[in-house]
Image (tube, coloured by chain):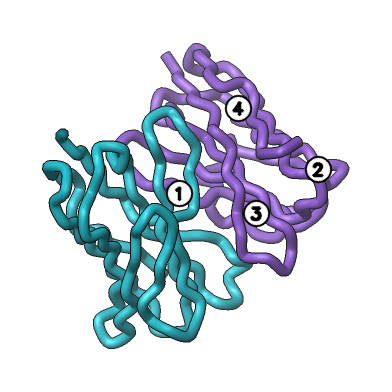
Chain colours: A cyan, B purple
Amino acid sequence: AQSVSQHNHHVILSEAASLELGCNYSYGGTVNLFWYVQYPGQHLQLLLKYFSGDPLVKGIKGFEAEFIKSKFSFNLRKPSVQWSDTAEYFCAVINSGGYNKLIFGAGTRLAVHP
Amino acid sequence: GAGVSQTPSNKVTEKGKYVELRCDPISGHTALYWYRQSLGQGPEFLIYFQGTGAADDSGLPNDRFFAVRPEGSVSTLKIQRTERGDSAVYLCASRRTGEDGYTFGSGTRLTVV
């Protein structure tokens, strides 16, 4: 069965620090990959997605992610975090032919201190 | 409406009771998904509707859980004989068929005491 692993459950950073959140998936076929963010008290929002083409994907709010097929990875990065990036981040995958149902990782809770 | 609406936002019920959770998707979105998010976990797939029919219910944990979408818009997730382990946030998402953008609701926080 498909699964998604997020390596860090909690990350604490100071403002302006760089961020990288790990995500690995287990599925050998064609996949579509997503990062979602959930700000405190809000619903899940899409940060970015990868379907095909350039493996370096740019999303909203300065986030980017790189798809490395050989490593089954889709790590999320941001060069300089802000206090407003404090949230929970979820990596998710859809396999082609799977009714487009998202399979989520357990999430990474990011706290950014001023 | 502009987004996916879920009601109630919070529900506290006693063990053994029956509950219904409602999802009102974005108008025109034929695909509807239910997820469950337990504390410290990512959302877990429960069931997917395409129109009125449940195309994939493989995520429903047992036969106490059931969902309907009789007119292809509003969906209701029904849980019988609730157990404390059912406590979680139940999320609904909708999508227009052929597009890849999901819209999630804010969820219903169910607490079984």
Question: Which label's residue is closer to the chain start, 2 or 3?
Answer: 3
Q: Which amino acid does label 1 sit on?
A: Glu
Do tags 2 and 1 sit on the same chain?
A: yes
Depth check: give the residue in front, A95 or B19: A95
Q: Is residue B86 left or right of residue B94?
A: left
- 3D distance between C-alphas at marks 2 and 3: 13 Å
Foreground: disc 2 or disc 1: 2
- 3D distance between C-alphas at marks 2 and 1: 22 Å
Disc 3: CA contacts within 10 A as few (<14), some (14-19) or many (>=20):
many
Q: Is residue A86 left or right of residue B31?
A: left
Locate the N terminus of chain B by quadrant. Answer: top right
For disc 1, the chain is: B
Q: What residue type is labelled 3?
A: Tyr
Q: What residue type is labelled 2?
A: Ser
Task: Give the residue pinned by disc 1.
Answer: B44
Q: Do the residues labelled 2 and 1 touch (CB within 8 Å)?
A: no
Q: What residue type is labelled 4?
A: Gln
Foreground: disc 4 or disc 3: 3
- Could you say whether the residue bearing mark 3 is in a helix, strand or loop? strand
Question: Which label's residue is closer to the chain start, 4 or 3?
Answer: 3
Q: Say which quarter of the image contains residue B25.
A: top right
Depth check: give the residue in front, A19 or B51: A19
Task: Give the residue pinned by disc 4.
Answer: B80
Q: Residue B73 bears which disc, if any?
A: 2
For disc 4, the chain is: B
Disc 1: CA contacts within 10 A as few (<14), some (14-19) or many (>=20):
many
